[in-house]
Amino acid sequence: MVEIKQGLMGTLEYNTDLFNADTITRMLGHFQTLLEGIVANPEQQICDLPLLPKTEQHQLLVEWNNTQTNYIQNKCCIHELFEAQVERSPDAIAVIFEDEQLTYEELNHRANQLAHYLRSLGVKPEVLVGICVERSLEMVIGILGILKAGGAYVPLDPAYPKERLAFMLEDAQISVLLTQQRLVKELPQREAKVVCLDADWEIIAQKNHKNLSTKFTFKNLAYVIYTSGSTGKPKGVMLSHSNLYNHMFWMQATFPLTKKDKVLQKTPFGFDASVWEFYAPLLAGGQLLIAKPGGHTDSAYLLKLIAQQQVTTVQLVPSLLQMLLEQGGIETCHSLKHVFCGGEILPVTLQESLLSKLDVNLHNLYGPTEACIDATFWNCQREIYPQLVPIGRPISNTQIYILDQNLQPVPVGVPGELYIGGVGVARGYLNLPELTAIKFIPNPFSNESGSRLYKTGDLVRYLPNGDIEILGRIDYQVKIRGFRIELGEIEARLNQHAKVREAVVVTWDDELTDKRLVAYVSPQSNQELTVIELRSFLKEKLPEYMIPSTFVLLQTLPLTPNGKLDRRSLPAPETLRPELEATYVMPQTEMEQAIATIWQKALNIENIGIHDNFFELGGHSLLLVKVNSQLREIFKTDLSLLDMFRYPTISSLAQSFSPIKNQTTSFHKPNNDIPVEKLKDGKANQKKRLQKIKSISNSSGVNE
């Protein structure tokens, strides 16, 4: 900076390997705007000083949010859109489940009968109806029937622990619960009226099968889905018909389906990504194909189903897509036209791998439950962004703002928190007005009365052309294999254990084991605490996907000088065999030794006994696919993933091979030196990566 006759003149030198001319030009504009603001109002606080020139601010706030689309003036409810489709194609096949199927008219009639029955039980607008069923025709009938009766459905996963289901039933004040006869004994104690969609159908079938008269509006609730909560309890997100209406019309306009399309429904219905799987085909005259219970974790089954049934549209979290690619055979799924990814960051390598194997349209979707399924989208293109896959731009009638902690828009390329506005924003959290007020704030950029923004907690930045790159989180919410998890919820549950003094849960990520949860626990004074106790305790309270795969017991958790938890000083989890109920028994036979070697490499554990459970060692479905592939190659046999779920120990797996197979099947013994080397390398790299992860976590914000 030098002084000349006309004033001050500045020169900016920059490294062209790090910055391009456009970025530097924007920076100079920001600096000039800042100086002008200081001169105009020298008493103003720094946080309130302007940084963006008016043209750039207009681009960020207005131009890149110009998504207004008027689909239909006279909006209606989702089930009414379905009824309109029934009129157009009554005899077409609507839904298929294994060897069962229903036409549009048959599905509509059954849903109407259920709706009339529910009306007789007092179901009306804003009444929440629980539905706890396995994936089946009853699931589709149940959801449609609840909506037609005017109620809002609350999905309850039968696999959840009873304590979690009991909380959801009580919190939602469920008075009517739809289920199946075989699940009744597994449900918690409840006051709700239980209706079995199978055993009670003779009674339900006596009701009128005609469409019900409309007694509610598109502003009424359509569903409430519970997500992980940092307080130790899940929280219900309330979504209306208008939220869902906008999403479904955007999706059909952007990715139009026809009567020739088949959509695979395989996402557990307790997650909002399942919602569009149900309605996308049913509103377009296509076919809804229901995967069997548990089928969403079996990559071989999914590939076979897609190929046999000629599925055209499927939704996969990136980790499941990785499983399908590693399973082998996705190149035979020629019927696929659209693959939608979401729930996790989509790696470039995964994008390139799929597009190199299959001529398909790959779409990267982003959106929290609080914004009705999706808020942004990106149509993947090879080699456009060699280092990343962006989440794209906002969907119709949705606004995206990237803001700093003072709710000021950040410049292009600068990280900030993502806020979502528009018609997709949920009503809020059920029975949690204080949390709703914190997370759903007044929209400072809108003149529309009641307009709000949802504070996502996601750290993102704008790319120069307006596409958005997701960078991570500003709090301790994580996504593991597509599951949204608040680490605070697991910590709160651990701290409820009578022998636990304090606990913290972090994510661990390395090349050998992928992302997993690690719990650090210190016991109460003079108390003996075991990993077996902790794991059993959590299994009674949390879904399986929220159970840490590794527990590290410490006398005390490390603290900073000011008394706060020092995450950077948490020790790296060891690669030793964890504490298990099973006594360690060394592999004896050549077959057991071969299986153990593969498991050691996959799980990053040095010693594994023949009675150790694969899943208690930290294994999960993605690792299972890798192990399955290696076992099939070595043993030259058709070992299914289902077999590996049935036989989760080395001993049971070895015994599952018949004596004939054991005598006739030859296999190549894996090189034992390779796993040991990788274990050592992985252990060394773990400490480096953990320090990096802890450093990022320590410098970020706190949980809600």
Image: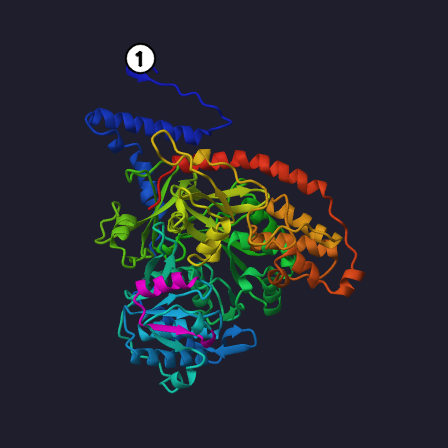
Q: Position of residue 485 (x, y in %)?
A: 42, 51
In the image, 302 versus 599, the foreground residue is: 599
Residue 121 on the magenta segment = no
In this image, 172 relative to 534: left or right? left
Compared to residue 212, the image places residue 288 above or below, namely above
Residue located at (34% from left, 81% from top) = 117
Compared to residue 83, the image places residue 423 above or below, namely above
Q: Residues within 10 Å of mark 1 (few under 14, many from 20)?
A: few
Q: What kind of colouring is applied to the model shown? A: rainbow
The residue indicated by pointer 1 is 4
> Of the residues shown, which amino acid type is indicated by label 1?
Ile
In the image, 177 versus 613, the foreground residue is: 613
Q: Magenta segment, which residues?
A: 161-182
Compared to residue 630, the image places residue 207 above or below, namely below
Q: Position of residue 510 (x, y in %)?
A: 55, 41
Q: Residue 128 appears in which quarter of the rendering?
A: bottom left
Q: Residue furthest bottom?
A: 206
Res. 512 visible in picture? yes
